[in-house]
Image (cartoon, rainbow, N blue to C red):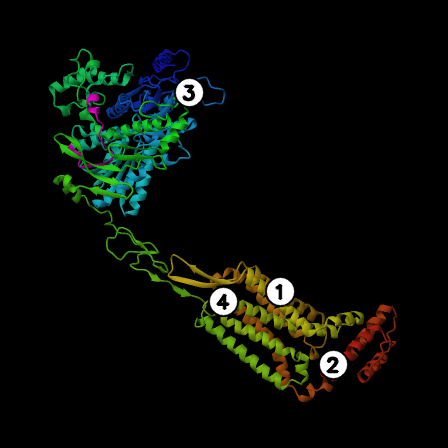
Amino acid sequence: MGTMSFCLWCFALGTFSLLGLGGCDMCNPVCGAQAPGDILIGVISSINAQVEDLSEREQPETYICRDFIVQSFVETLAVIHTIDVINKQDFLPGIQLGYIIYDDCSYPTEALHVTEHMMTSNQTSTTQCGSLGHPAVKGVLGARFSEVSITVARLLALYMVPQISMSSSADILDDKLRFPSFLRTVPSDVYQTKAIVRLMTYFNWDWIGIVSGDDDYGMEALQNFLLDAAGEKMCVDYQEVIPQYLNNDNSENKISQVAQKIRSSEAQVVLVILKEELVMKLFAEMIRTNTTRIWIASDAWSMSGLLASMPGINKVGDIFGFSFMTGPNPGFSDFLQNLQPEPGAVNHFIEEYKNLRFGCTPEILQYRKCLASNALDSCPAPAPLSFTSPSACNIADPQEANDDFLLQAVNINVTYSQRLAVWSLAHALKKLLKCNETVCQGDTDFPPWKLLAELKNISFTLDNTQFSFNENGSFSSGYDFINWVRDGSHRTFRVIGRYNISENDLEVKLDEIDQETRNNTAVSNLSCCSECADCQEGTFSDLEGQAECEPCPNGTWSMRGSEQCQPRNETFFKLDDPYGIVLLTFECLGVLLLLVVFVIFLVARDSPPVKVAGGNLCYVMMAGLLISFVGVIFFMLKPTDAICQTRQTMYGMGFTLCVSCILVKAFRTFLAFLFDLHQQHNLKKLYKPIMIIVLFTIIQGFICIFWLVFDSPRLNSITSNQSMEIQLQCIEGSGVGFGVMLSYIGLLAFICFLLAFKGRKVPQRFNETGYIIFSMLIYLFVWVCFIPIYVTKNQQRSAVQASAIMVSNYGIIFCHFFPKCYMILCKKKQDLSPRAYLDRIRIFSITSSNLAVARASVDSGNGDMESPSTPNSMSSEVITASVPRKATCHSKDLLITESLTYLRRRVKSSSL
């Protein structure tokens, strides 16, 4: 289907829609301009600024667009002119490029509408269900605004149709996962904000205000600028956001509020990231209130001819901005002064422009009448009347009229991006179609994704400059630094520098800036840091009026408001702490007591008290206690990983050794007074003192080894932002190994307690049960109390555990060694002789025998108790001689007799 017939079909459907026929008032927009060709290029342009009465729209009615944008119109004409140049030069031999142009009305929904129409209605053949087919449009140029381009790019990504924007610079479009078919001939806003920051640092502007739009372009540019500005220590006095939709009910009120904020602020530099239509409204308010500032223009309005010719523009102050790369567009000036569609082409946009420029309407007549009787400033004409020709209403046919208004209203050098975009497509097509100097051999009915692949890889030269798309699909062409120079009652644009993206460098030609502007840039260097605040913790400032506090170097810290950073003071449980001195005193006293006990026991090593206390086992116990005492010192040294591991290991092994010896003593006493001979005989096989001590100590050794290997204690440094101290503290790994070690010692202590408790009825004069019970109760009580205190007192854990160890050690000394020392030193020698011990055993045997016989009589049911003479005489015999195991006395008497015989032999042989 020919392109001309398609446009007529499109126009017909649009007419039917207006008549309400077919219910398709949203699906077929009227073509704005078109020209036939072998390969069709789609163009989405923002010819009009807004949709009329959008807030009142309730039904899917056709959008009515208004407010003609001259800048967009000229940019669209630049695309048409470049396509014509390529066709006339026969750059693609035998191939003519055609175009179809739609107006998106600067509104994303309308842009989506026209794009959908472009992709679904221009099929070259009938496609099967589920197939996307080959759209007649092979590439799309546009849109102008980033918010619109983002919407369009999502739909075009479905067809993988290449989209080249000439002005959409939002950095979100760099995301090739979401926008795989989007390309642009301008850099990303990431670089524009960097350029603006470089400009401000160049002139030392560190106190600024920001006014931005609420669309994607404005919000992303704002965030990028804030990030870059923070790195250069700039102060942002205010951030104001204006709705980008021009017909928004709140726009006028918001602009008035923003203008009031600008006037009330002392910040003399204002960054404006808005559409030119909104900037015009803001400047009108500035002109009305005679407010002067230094204005930084984003690329959206930095080269706006309408703003530059706005009445009173010289009153707003100095204006700087960054523009996309500008360049020549040969023949375009003549094209603008002789606006006529090419033969076979249709261009409703030119018709609309000429009607607005040269046509005669009641509004224009009223405006001209005002101009005739008043000054120009007294008759402000809103767009589109603002570019009405003075000769309007004097021309018979507006479509035949031409003038140089467009050359004056728009700097045609800004259309260089449009020229680059069209030539990019041309070079990619030339490679895709395998063109030589005379013919293109490729098929023109190719899928658009093939053209996209060629575009990503092309590199071409234009005006002696090399161009190509980077990995993000953008040109890295840099920015021109623009100064709005006063020229009578309006402004002209002068390039006074350039920003280099690769080097992040701004080149400024100061001699191109007039003296008045240079003076203004100097006096506007007002710092917002006059109200200084204290530096936060971890930062410092040693210079008065410094914009930002410096972070402290590694290993140092500072408190709030500090002028310098210092190393933190290390704190830990020390020997010279008051409580440390107390513990060290008791530790030394404990070691001294052990030494005294050792000397006493060594001198009286053959005495019954020493034998009863365990003989050589006592020295092993003392060694274990000494290791435990020495381990306490490590709790008061500067923690390191090695010290953390050593102190727990010394306590665990030393105290386990001591408790193992006590277990042997408890087990011995339990066996000696066990009256079940059969059970006694079986348990006596387990009574291997050395083996028991070695086995239980080795088990603890394995526990410590596994703990040290898999979950070792280590140094932990605890800091706080509100303190200059660093607390050094040992942590016991995850706590599992520590818990197992303590639980094992507690288990041994509990077994000692049970064995001693079973033999508690043995007379205290010749057994250890009472001392064992009491010492183990002390240990268990101390360590049960230790657990909650240890958990809650995080910073005092070393002192808590050292205290618990100390009390446990003293419990062993006082319960096991002091009573024996008292007996050795204070008892009469006759009371310590073997004969005296045998006499005490004899008394016990008589008492126990009588009691046993009485119980036996009761158990047998005999009402008359036996005469006590028999058991007494039997017991006497036991003292003097052994009684056969098969004696006829009661079984209880036999058990007692056997036990006493065992004791007598032990005492006589001095091996007890």
Element on which disc 2 rests: helix
- Specify the quadrant of the image occupied by residue 159: top left
Element on which disc 3 rests: helix
Give the CA distance from mark 4 to mark 1. Answer: 23 Å
Element on which disc 1 rests: helix
Residue placed most toward the observer, 908 or 106: 106
| Residue 122 x/y as whole percent | 40, 18
Please indicate, yes or no, whether residue 254 appears anywhere in the rendered image.
Answer: yes
* Nearer mark to the viewer, of 4 and 1: 4
Q: Where is mark 2, residue-wise?
A: 906
| Sequence order check, earlier mark of 4 and 3 | 3
| Sequence order check, earlier mark of 2 and 3 | 3
Q: Where is mark 4, residue-wise?
A: 642
| Sequence order check, earlier mark of 4 and 1 | 4
| Residue density around tag 4, few if under 14, some if 14–19, many if 20 or more, within 10 Å | few
| Residue 269 x/y as whole percent | 22, 40
Residue depicted at 30% across the width and 28% down the height:
423
Please indicate, yes or no, whether residue 98 appears anywhere in the rendered image.
Answer: no
Q: Is 236 left, or right, of 158 in this rendering? A: left
Q: Where is mark 3, residue-wise?
A: 120
* Nearer mark to the viewer, of 3 and 1: 3
Inspect the image, locate mark 4, and give the three-letter code of the amino acid beneath it: Ala
Q: Is 27 left, or right, of 505 in this rendering? A: right
Inspect the image, locate mark 3, and give the three-letter code of the amino acid beneath it: Thr
Whether the magenta-drawn stretch holds residue 320 is answered as yes
| Sequence order check, earlier mark of 2 and 1 | 1
Q: Where is mark 1, residue-wise?
A: 744
Residue stretch in magenta: 314-336
Residue placed most toward the observer, 302 or 480: 480
Inspect the image, locate mark 1, and give the three-letter code of the amino acid beneath it: Tyr
| Residue density around tag 2, few if under 14, some if 14–19, many if 20 or more, within 10 Å | few
